[in-house]
Amino acid sequence: MSDLPKIDIEGDSEPAVALALLRIIMESAADKAEHSRDWILSTYADCLAVVGGAEVAYDEEDEDEEGEESSGQP
């Protein structure tokens, strides 16, 4: 059972859908680690952007690109 507080999300507004998406992400975390306030707010902002139709770049992708640049690969 999840240690996250129970949150009933009603409606289909973009903020409500983003909050539901954030909840799914937090529940699916493999390590079930507690997340910092900054992580939660940043992830919610990403969820809100995605629900609004934006594409969001992720840190893993940024790290991969940096690794390619430093190795001299295009």
Image (cartoon, helix red, strand yellow):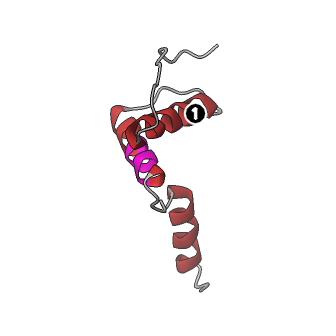
Q: What element carries label 1?
A: helix
Q: In this view, does 74 lie to the left or right of 52?
A: right
Which residue corresponds to mark 1?
A: 24
Q: Quadrant of the C terminus?
A: bottom right
- Most frequent secondary structure within the magenta stretch: helix
Identity, as a three-letter code, of the amino acid under mark 1: Ile
Q: Which residue lies furthest to the front in this view?
A: 11
Magenta-highlighted residues: 43-49
Q: How crowded is mark 1: few (under 14 residues within 10 Å), some or many (20 or more)?
A: few
For the residue pair 12 and 57, the one nearer the viewer reads as 12
Note whether 59 is above or below 73 in the view shown: above
Residue 26 location (% of width, % of height)? 54, 32
For the residue pair 9 and 22, the one nearer the viewer reads as 9
Q: In which quarter of the image is the N terminus?
A: top right
Residue 55 location (% of width, % of height)? 49, 62
Residue 66 location (% of width, % of height)? 51, 71
